[in-house]
Image: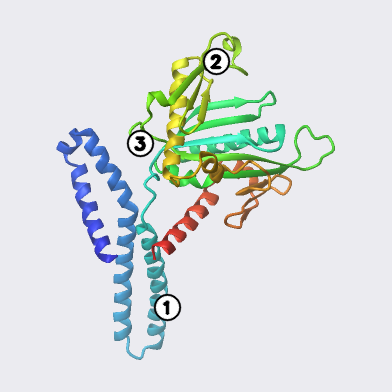
Amino acid sequence: MWDKLTALASRYEELGGKIADPAVLAARETWQGLVKEHARLTPVVECYKRYKTTSRELDEARALLAEAGADGELRSMIESEIAELSGRKEAVEQELRALLVPRDPMDDRNVIIEVRAGTGGGEAALFAADLFRMYSRYAERQGWGTEVLVNHVTDMGGLKEGVLAVKGGNAYSRLKFESGVHRVQRVPVTESSGRIHTSAATVAVLPEAEEVDVAIAPDDLVIETFCASGPGGQHVNKTESAVRITHVPTRLVVSCQDEKSQHKNRDKAMRVLRSRLLKLAQDEKHREVAELRRSQVGTGDRSERIRTYNFPQTRVTDHRLGLTLHRLDAVIDGDLDEVVDALVRADQARRMWQAE
């Protein structure tokens, strides 16, 4: 491990010199690649520097203890410092080991988030809309860009299906754990007796595919156009601007009708289709497509869930971690860092264990 860290620190210094070289800066694509590699190495090298500093201070403290003689007060002070430095060194070493675990190659990708209403009727659609806003606001807090690709709303302002593109550094690494069934417990606005209802929505998080990732033969696509429906003003049902694309080999279907331009709707639908196909390619090759989709988002049934949002108790529980937070309002407003950080740490621990 230490040889690898020394090599990474050397590479980091080399990259810093290259990035500052005007000749390299002139080759824009090459320079951007070096900057990306430099940024990826930064947390590892900075942690390694902290480790070396702590190790040096610990060695110096031990040397002082050897020279302290019989002075009890001085020895006690130095021993206390040694204990503190030893604990710090062990913690930094654990952090280093976690940073050296191979990363998911998709972690740096932009993201496609799909949110759909599950069981629960109109209340499930309203909850899906809440989740869609939650992820939009979380992206905003992270400084990421967003673009709505699909937005199929209900008459009550709920969401049948919403697809959000998120663009920003490490977006997939932070959001990939959101895939699954999300359950809500609350009194619906239409409930006059005050009874608490349980509803669900499904979330799928896909790394956004680039054209080079997935080869799509034109003959494998059936592209249909139709008149848009739902909110949209005078444009609705006047022209066939909506687009439905079927990928025949996998039977995946993507439709988009939010833009007035048929060309823009087609481009958005293709972005979603490519990302879904990339996700399929990442999973086990011999599964049926229905099983692949179900493995990520489940059936949408209330009994399946990764997280529960209990409004009467202002409680959010992530069932994979056993983590409960009593700050539902903040979470549903996009303050997801505490949950995401815990999920990232758990994933790092799992991958470290597997690597060993």
Figure quadrant of residue 335: top right
- Spatial CA distance of label 2 from label 3 is 29 Å
Quarter holding residue 68: bottom left
Quick one: quadrant of the C terminus? bottom left
Q: How would you rate the neighbour count of disc 1 (Cα within 10 Å): few for under 14, some for 14-19, many for 20 or more?
A: few
Specify few, some or many for label 3: CA neighbours under 10 Å numbering under 14, 14-19, or 20 or more: few
On residue 341, the disc is none
The answer to whether marks 1 and 2 mark residues whose Cβ atoms lie closer than 8 Å is: no
Q: Residues within 10 Å of mark 2 (few under 14, many from 20)?
A: some
| Farthest-out residue, left | 23
Query: Which residue is at the front of the view, 351 or 227?
Result: 227
Identify the mark at residue 80; answer none if there is no mark. 1
Disc 3 marks which residue? 213
N-term mark: 1 or 2? 1
Q: Quadrant of the N terminus?
A: bottom left
Q: Position of residue 10 (x, y in %)?
A: 21, 56
Residue type marked 2: Phe
Image coordinates for residue 209, horizontal then vertical, percent:
40, 35
Q: Is residue 333 visible?
A: no
Q: Is 250 placed above or below 305 here?
A: above
Where residue 270 sits in the image (x, y, percent)? 44, 26
Q: Is residue 269 above or below residue 62?
A: above
In percent of width and height, residue 101 lies at 37, 58
Q: Earlier in the sequence, mark 3 or mark 1?
A: 1
Residue 6 can be seen, yes or no:
yes
Secondary structure of residue under mark 2: strand
Q: Residue furthest right?
A: 193
Return the residue at label 2. Answer: 226
Relative to 351, is 327 above or below? above
Task: Please give left or right for residue 187 compared with residue 147 in the image.
Answer: right
